[in-house]
Image (cartoon, rainbow, N blue to C red):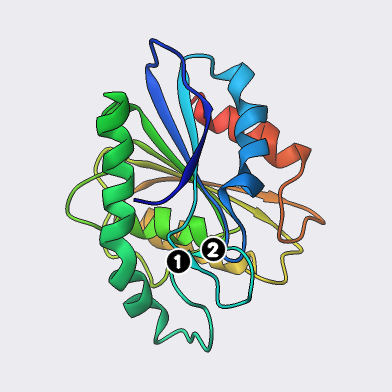
Amino acid sequence: MSLAITVQRPTSATELILLFHGVGSSAADLAPLGEALAPHRPQACIVSVQAPDASDFGSGWQWFSVQGVTEAGRPARVAATMQRFVDTVQHWQRETGIGTATTTLLGFSQGSIMALESTQQPIALASRIVAIAGRFAQPPRLAPAGTRIHLLHGDADAVMPVRLSVDGQAQLQALGAEVTLDRFPGLGHGVDARVLAKVLDRLKD
């Protein structure tokens, strides 16, 4: 099971928010985002999850290698690690006694890829996906029943271009999925106060 940092765990938690960091980062890197969310979601169990494998780049962690990754090869890499991601989410649902209906998966970059691709699995893991600076590994194939997808992306992202979220929104809408896209002018591959404010808005949806 992946390592994790429990940011907040109320005794009577009614929702579960799992945070998934980007490649080369760690649970500690995304924990401050969870800490910023905590006062606004006092009944939420908030956990920053660490990816299971050491990063190819010498520091941090990853769900899959991006060394030499291509558009054609990315889906297979994601598929190969997806069961570990599913197991991690279900572990925390069992641990907290909180089910799919009140679970949010919040990812950044590679964490977003895993969260988004999890919606293409036969069994729903969460009622809400918040994907920051992310993308689908391949065009979505189905509209996840009962799962709302919120895409947040900086217009100046040079690592994961915003067009990937624009395309993802259009593809999901064509499938009949519930999806929103929020774009942030001038923001690169990161999170700022505008993103935090919008995440809080989307958690109220």
Foreground residue, 73 or 28? 28
Foreground residue, 117 or 29? 29
Q: Residue at x 59, y 54 (%)?
A: 26
Q: Position of residue 169 (x, y in %)?
A: 47, 57
* 107 to 95, vertically: above or below: below
Q: Residue at x 56, y 77 (%)?
A: 56
Q: Position of residue 115 (x, y in %)?
A: 41, 53
Assess whether mark 1 and mark 2 are in contact (beta carbons under 8 angstroms).
yes
Return the residue found at the far right: 186
Return the residue found at the far left: 122
Marks 2 and 1, the one that precedes in the sequence: 1
Residue type for callout 2: Trp
Q: CA distance from mark 2 to mark 1?
A: 5 Å
Q: Quadrant of residue 116?
A: bottom left
Whether residue 100 is visible to the viewer of this picture, yes or no, is: no
Q: Quadrant of residue 186?
A: bottom right
Q: Position of residue 13 (x, y in %)?
A: 40, 16
Residue type for callout 1: Asp
Whether residue 52 is visible to the viewer of this picture, yes or no, is: yes
Q: Residue at x 42, y 70 (%)?
A: 137
- Asked whether, in this view, residue 185 is left or right of residue 175, the answer is right
Q: Quadrant of residue 80?
A: bottom left
Q: Position of residue 84 (x, y in %)?
A: 30, 58
- For disc 2, the neighbor class at 10 Å (few under 14, some 14 to 19, many from 20) is many
- Mark 2, secondary structure of its residue: strand
Residue located beneath label 2 in the image? 61
- Mark 1, secondary structure of its residue: strand
- Asked whether, in this view, residue 8 is left or right of residue 88, the answer is right
Residue located beneath label 1 in the image? 53
Q: Residue at x 56, y 53 (%)?
A: 21
* 188 to 182, vertically: above or below: below
